[in-house]
Image: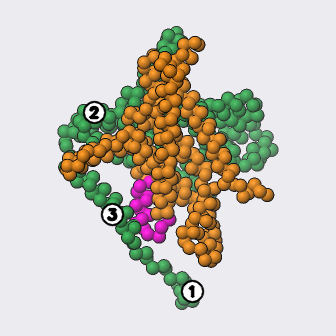
């Protein structure tokens, strides 16, 4: 660096000294963390881990597989819904809007109860159409509600992403003589998916959190196993273990998304 | 059909009055949680903009934890954890034991979750307000508090409103989770009615319709607030 530029360069601002509020705030967190460490050291119980460790892992697997399967099913359902939302036909638009409004405007737990307890009333009907095996199982009921619920949210994500692609991309494709499907899947969708990446990742995180509800209808996911472990031992650390596992899962996903987004948008950065 | 009307009717034979009480509980829990979440979220967003590194870090830790945990788990942590803590505190000090009711636990848990999300909404709204607004206020000789109240806040509310409206809808729906720890809200009343009358589809369906009505009423109300915050623009 030459003498001139160093004379012009603004000196780095002095490093801020932590003030009282910051010290108190971080102090509280350190105290909380220390309290947890002490608590765990005191309450640590090898038999507890021997008894419930594998159950927690199988619960974690149930949570992950439930979320993954319902996310994929929701993605499939969301495509026609999103197209319906953008359709010219008012009937299709109205139906898609009603679907989205219904699932986004009511609590997931009420939807799950309606399916799990309410559909049992039509036991005979489902048996005649051969679907009773599906609605009899709590796991499938949870899957069904979660998939439809996320389909409504994903339809909105998809619609927003598709509409964010400039019209010129469609027109450019048309002028090259490409058929509509090719324009949609090869030109519009790849661009829309980059826009939709972050909302989709957020949706998966929301689903991981929401999937804890299926424990209420006796699915032994991570939260269900936790409730069972607590009811057997009355040991509060069972809940803390679950909290740590959920946090690890969500944070890992969040960081993976950040990384993926950086990699995928390399060509867009200047 | 007549049966259905009797079941949903008010009085001894129907469950209408129970469901109506449930609506009241759901609405009052949401309304009671809202100020906690808004104030805490606002304070957190101020902390996140602070020059103090430790304060920023503390606020970020808070957000990471309560945005990442399932709401149901947060609720159980508060309900069982705080009550266990209060119990051992009572035993240690010999003071009379107090315990959080499901309503207060719901308020605390949902308020904390709301504030974690609200702080991000407020933070991005703060960033959307140009620096010049603050500097202009200071140049006019207003104090820091008055700049915040008279210059920044009115603009902040307008920008943050759509995000906060979303959070309000989530809050309204999340109150249904508190029924799991025994709060007599819409969902719990519907569940009791469903079990007694053996008409689960009817009652859970009614509960869903009631939530839909609450959502629609909210979006009408939010539309009104939105027009009110933009009243300056519409005068043109």
- The chain to which mark 2 is attached is A
Does A42 sit left or right of B233 as displayed?
left
Mark 2 secondary-structure assignment: helix
Give the quarter of the image for residue B140: bottom right
Expressed as whole percent of the image width and height from the top left, the position of residue B213 reads: 59, 33
Expressed as whole percent of the image width and height from the top left, the position of residue B139 reads: 62, 77
Q: How many marks?
A: 3
* Disc 3 packing (10 Å; few <14; some 14–19; many ≥20): some
According to the picture, the residue beneath numbered tag 3 turns out to be: A27
- The chain to which mark 1 is attached is A
Q: Is residue A22 above or below residue A155?
A: below
Q: Is residue B59 magenta?
A: yes
- Distance from Cα at disc 3 to Cα at disc 1: 40 Å
Q: Say which chain is green.
A: A
Q: Say which chain is orange.
A: B
Q: Is residue B19 magenta?
A: no
According to the picture, the residue beneath numbered tag 1 turns out to be: A8
Outermost front residue = B11
- Judge by depth and name the residue closer to the eye, B217 or B51: B217
Q: Earlier in the sequence, mark 1 or mark 2?
A: 1
- Distance from Cα at disc 3 to Cα at disc 2: 34 Å
Residue drawn where x is 48% and y is 45% of the image: B32
Residue numbers of the magenta segment: B49-63
Q: Is residue A66 above or below residue B161?
A: above
Residue drawn where x is 70% and y is 31% of the image: A94
- Judge by depth and name the residue closer to the eye, A203 or B16: B16
Residue drawn where x is 39% and y is 67% of the image: A22
According to the picture, the residue beneath numbered tag 2 turns out to be: A231
Q: Which mark is residue A80?
A: none
């Amino acid at each position: 660096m030459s003498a001139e530029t160093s004379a012009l360069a603004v000196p780095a601002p002095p490093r801020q000294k932590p003030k009282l509020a910051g010290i108190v705030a971080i102090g509280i967190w350190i105290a909380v963390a220390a309290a947890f460490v002490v608590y765990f050291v005191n309450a640590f119980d090898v038999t507890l881990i021997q008894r419930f460790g594998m159950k927690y892992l199988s619960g974690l697997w149930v949570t992950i597989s439930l979320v993954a399967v319902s996310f994929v099913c929701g993605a499939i359902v969301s495509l026609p819904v999103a197209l319906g939302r953008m359709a010219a036909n008012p009937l299709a638009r109205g139906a898609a809007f009603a679907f989205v409004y219904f699932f986004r405007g009511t609590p997931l737990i009420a939807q799950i109860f309606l399916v799990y307890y309410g559909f049992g009333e039509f036991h005979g009907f489902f048996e005649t159409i051969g679907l009773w095996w599906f609605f009899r199982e709590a796991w499938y009921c949870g899957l069904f509600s979660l998939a439809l619920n996320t389909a409504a949210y994903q339809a909105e994500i998809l619609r927003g992403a598709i509409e964010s692609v400039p019209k010129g991309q469609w027109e450019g494709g048309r002028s090259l003589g490409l058929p509509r499907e090719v324009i949609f899947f090869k030109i519009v969708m790849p661009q829309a998916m980059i826009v939709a990446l972050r909302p989709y990742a957020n949706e998966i995180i929301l689903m991981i959190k929401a999937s804890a509800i299926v424990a209420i209808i006796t699915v032994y996911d991570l939260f269900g196993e936790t409730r069972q472990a607590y009811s057997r031992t009355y040991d509060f650390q069972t809940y803390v273990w679950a909290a740590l596992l959920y946090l690890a899962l969500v944070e890992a996903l969040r960081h993976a998304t950040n990384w993926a987004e950086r990699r995928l948008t390399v060509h867009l950065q200047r | 059909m007549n049966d259905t009307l009797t079941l949903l009717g008010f009085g001894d034979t129907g469950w209408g009055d129970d469901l109506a009480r449930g609506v009241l509980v759901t609405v009052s829990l949401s309304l009671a949680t809202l100020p906690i979440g808004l104030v805490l979220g606002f304070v957190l967003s101020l902390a996140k903009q602070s020059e103090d590194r430790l304060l920023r870090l503390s606020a970020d830790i808070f957000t990471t934890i309560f945005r990442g945990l399932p709401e149901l788990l947060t609720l159980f942590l508060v309900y069982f954890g705080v009550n266990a803590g209060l119990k051992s505190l009572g035993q240690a000090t010999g003071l009379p034991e107090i315990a959080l009711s499901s309503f207060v636990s719901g308020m605390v848990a949902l308020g904390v979750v709301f504030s974690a999300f609200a702080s991000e909404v407020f933070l991005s709204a703060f960033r959307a307000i140009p620096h010049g607004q603050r500097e202009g206020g200071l140049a006019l000789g207003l104090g820091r508090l008055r700049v915040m109240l008279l210059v920044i806040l009115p603009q902040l509310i307008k920008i943050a409103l759509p995000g906060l409206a979303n959070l309000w809808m989530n809050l309204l729906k999340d109150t249904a989770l508190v029924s799991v720890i025994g709060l007599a809200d819409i969902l719990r009343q519907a569940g009791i009615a469903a079990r007694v009358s053996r008409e689960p589809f009817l009652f859970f369906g009614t509960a869903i319709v009631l939530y839909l009505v609450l959502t629609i009423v909210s979006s009408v109300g939010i539309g009104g607030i939105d027009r009110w915050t933009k009243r300056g623009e519409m005068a043109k």
